[in-house]
Image (tube, rainbow, N blue to C red):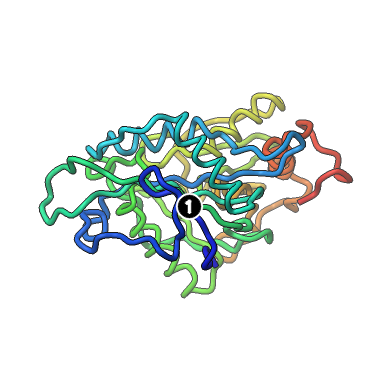
Amino acid sequence: MYYNEETIIYLDNEFVKAADSKMNLYSQSLHYGYSAFEGIRSYKTANGIKIFKQEEHFDRLRISCEAVGIPYPWTNEELINATYRLLEKNNLDNAYIRPLVFCPPNMSLQKATSSHILLAAWEWGAYLGNSLLRVGLSTFQRPNPKGFKIHAKISGHYVNSIMACQEAKDNGYDEALLTDMNGFVAEGPGANIFYEKDGKLFTPAPGNILTGITRATVMELCNEMAIELTEKQITVDELKAADAVFYCGTAAEIIGWESLDGESFKIPFNTSVSRRIQLAYKNRVLELELEPKRSLIDV
């Protein structure tokens, strides 16, 4: 699904075949989840193949590494250039890109003194599909921010997401919703959340969430489209009373909800302000006009 015998990856400043590459089984990252990663998308836009928010993603990769003490000697320029070459070598345009910084052999819990860089890319549709989501409230909560660097995209953090996602699937839902340690709405296993009420949008405030790059793009769109947006603590009951809800993330893009714990929302998603945001986001990544005509693009 992700690679074949001809797939090329970028590994420590070299382009090599994915099928021939190796990782040391004593890596500190393999044993302890001590690594940082990104999820980035490229699009075949009206102006050629473009990596969306490339600077922001590689900035966050560096910040994540710095947060947990992983050496990060690369510049944005060299990694962005390598990523475009990677897309070309694999003949990809609409692609999902996975940078990963991982550590060498080390069975201790001390800081790494060096690190490795991987860039991989593959064709991947919207992570959560294109149908409205049936979401279930998870029994798992996001970790206490005093115990983890919540703002960093660290591999080990995602065990929490895997458990929540597995639980949701086992209970017959499409995806999970996690709360923070105080019971307020936090985010999905791999996406931020917005809800709509009376034409206004609301999203959890920073502090207990990974403040995503797609989330920031939605906020930009709200400003440009004169849609009122508030960051605040949100209760589950407040969310259930929403007119519409959506998840957003690089992998998921923007995807609306059908229901939460089997309870549907008040207005059809296709008539909501949230739908306008969904369409505007798609046009933003494709470098088309802000407010889309439905005949032009209607995802």
Instruction: Tell me the residue at 39%/42% (across/down).
Output: 13
Count neighbours of disc 1 (C-alpha within 10 A) and say few if under 14, some if 14 to 19, many if 20 or more.
Answer: many
Horizontally, is 233 left or right of 96 in the view? left
Front in this rendered view, residue 237 or 200: 200
Horizontally, is 83 left or right of 123 in the view? left
Query: Is residue 185 shown to the viewer in this render?
Result: no
Front in this rendered view, residue 12 or 251: 12
Could you say where residue 153 lies in the image, as x and y percent from the top left?
Answer: 37, 44
User: Label 1 belongs to which residue?
Assistant: 120
Assign the N terminus to one quadrant of the image: bottom right
Could you say where residue 139 lies in the image, as x and y percent from the top left?
Answer: 38, 62
Could you say where residue 97 lies in the image, as x and y percent from the top left?
Answer: 52, 49
Could you say where residue 252 lies in the image, as x and y percent from the top left?
Answer: 58, 52
Query: Is residue 83 shown to the viewer in this render?
Result: yes
Instruction: Tell me the residue at 30%/60% (across/down).
Output: 23
* Location of residue 214 (image quadrant): top right
